[in-house]
Image (cartoon, coloured by chain):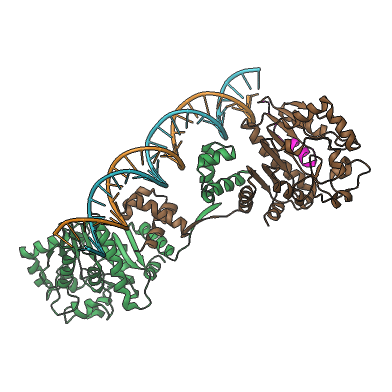
Chain colours: A brown, B green, C orange, D cyan
Amino acid sequence: MLNQQLMVKASWFYHVEGLTQAQIADRMLLTRRRVNELLAAALQQGIVRVSFNSPLADSVEMEAELCRRHGLTDVVIVPTPNDKAQMPLVLGRAAAMFLDQMVHAGKVQSLGVGWGATLRETAHQLTPTNSADIKVHSMMGGLTRGSEVNTFEIVRRFAKRLNAECHYLAAPIYADDPASRDTIIAQSVFAALLRDAVDVNVCLLSVGDVTQESLQVRYGLPTRTEISELVGAGAVGDLLGRYLDQDGCEIDHPLNRQVISPELEEYRNIPCRIIASGGFNKRQIIRACLANDLVDVLVTDSETASWLLM
Amino acid sequence: MLNQQLMVKASWFYHVEGLTQAQIADRMLLTRRRVNELLAAALQQGIVRVSFNSPLADSVEMEAELCRRHGLTDVVIVPTPNDKAQMPLVLGRAAAMFLDQMVHAGKVQSLGVGWGATLRETAHQLTPTNSADIKVHSMMGGLTRGSEVNTFEIVRRFAKRLNAECHYLAAPIYADDPASRDTIIAQSVFAALLRDAVDVNVCLLSVGDVTQESLQVRYGLPTRTEISELVGAGAVGDLLGRYLDQDGCEIDHPLNRQVISPELEEYRNIPCRIIASGGFNKRQIIRACLANDLVDVLVTDSETASWLLM
DNA sequence: AGCTGTAAGTTACATATGTTACGCCGATGT
DNA sequence: ACATCGGCGTAACATATGTAACTTACAGCT
């Protein structure tokens, strides 16, 4: 009746038969403390182990690991959909559920939102609330060309769902040239808008990639800008219209000096920054955001998560 | 973020990251109660399960099952030794450890013992104690022929180990014939001895088989008794010198009317009846004892246990 | 023999856990 | 629209758990 034997036996009584430690102590003629030690030791030595019997377990493990590695508050991983057109849908649903919880728990006073198919879906999936005095701010200017996923459209949807005040960022995303941008943001009305945009306690954004599939590329960029130029300058994608390199730093390109959106350093101060993005094209830019600590909560798909952990 | 998802996640935090339920509730924006439910549900639905990673686990499982099926207080299973000559040694050691614990816990006031190689080994392995006023009683009469495992020898060893009073049952195991037996046990001195033998609160016996290897056959039986007669009468082995059929009932044979040992119905009243026996030959008689509720604690080997559970 | 260090038991206590009671809210059905 | 009902959150509680402080017992050493 060695120690090993005792550990297994105590563990059996505890985990299988559901006895309490005191009962086990009685039954095995030991002290309760001894039983306590045996159980802890059995767990620690792997004599008994808890195993997860669920396909979701991998996700949870990856979530924990991503949190740990990048100091994130939370990670939500959804199964990668077979049809990649479903990606915004599933990510949107997951982001909506996450946001729902935060709203419900009263953690959201003011919400900054970006744009894109994922956010559009998020707004759609949000459960309506009328509990709190939430303010919703657009964090990016609006497109000058039409699109089914305009920033104005997005922020309005969020506000409607949340019965919230709706604040538009009434400006184009990009000025025609750096000098023009500087002139514009020097105007107090725009300066105030940009200030308000980052004066939120929660924000929900997605990131853009640098392929032809990017909405930004299709609808957002000034007409004469070529995506290849940006890639050539090291861009792996954009956050808030600002193109970032693989370290998450803004690339040196005129476009980044034309953008009308909060400075990254301002953005950094937002207490809870949620980024919802996934899929092959977004891998690089997501990693860049993680690398430069531009995220607190990541909502992504399992394949991307797995790649991020490689 | 379905219920399944939540269960896995909560379980992960709890079992892998070691958070408390309250911490998980905070982190997942749920109530502590909800987390509690999730964890219970995850366990119950097998989403997480505790698995035993030890060769001893099988034994423990069988112990539990034997307890359950036969209403035993305890079962100790030792690995079946490759060399069957080792059987008394390992069983003896296990029985000794078990008895040690009982003695140490003050559960043993008076101990009745039988005889055999296993008990001899048990006495040998017992750790010496001088704590309590224990009395040791032999529960069977002594052999009339010499043997290295005499009942007197056994009880003396036990008493010495335990620093206990030693009470012999000064009589032969078998009288020459039933009438003689009746005459003997009518004598008050023998009646008292038999009464004392069962007036113990713990007893430790082993059982005998009906093969030529049996000690009883070799040394105990009256010279003119043939084992084949007993087998013919349905015997599968003996307890306290009384031959039992497969249901644990005494067979109808003169030998059972010659035996000088406590009646089974008296024996039944002993609060804690430990039987230590194992090996192929003893299977049937062990099962018989279990069937007729003649055991509270069984010490046996894993192959026998496995067979008993078939 | 007496001393001393270690290991184990005992007690006590701060947390953690599982469960109950109760009340709010939203859904359902008339 | 109103009443009923079930689910969920809150709070409270009785247990169970994990630890620390203290005591006792034992074994080895001088």
Q: Residue at x 42, y 60 (%)?
A: B61
Q: Residue A299: image x %, image y %? A: 69, 44
Q: Nearer the viewer, residue C15 or B162?
A: C15
Residue at 69% over, 27% down: A134
Task: Judge from the rendering whether residue A64 lies leftward or rightward of residue A239; answer left or right.
Answer: left
Magenta run includes residue A127: yes
Occupied quadrant, residue B308:
bottom left
Q: Which residues are magenta?
A: A115-130
Q: Nearer the viewer, residue B77 or B170?
A: B77
Q: Quadrant of the rendered structure where residue A118 is?
A: top right
Quadrant location, the C terminus of chain B: bottom left
Residue A231: in magenta span? no
The spot of residue B259 in percent (x, y) is: 16, 70
Residue B265, visible in the rendered structure: yes
**Residue B250: x percent and y percent?**
24, 67
Residue under the point 57% across and 37% down = B30
Nearest to the observer: residue A255 or residue B5 = A255
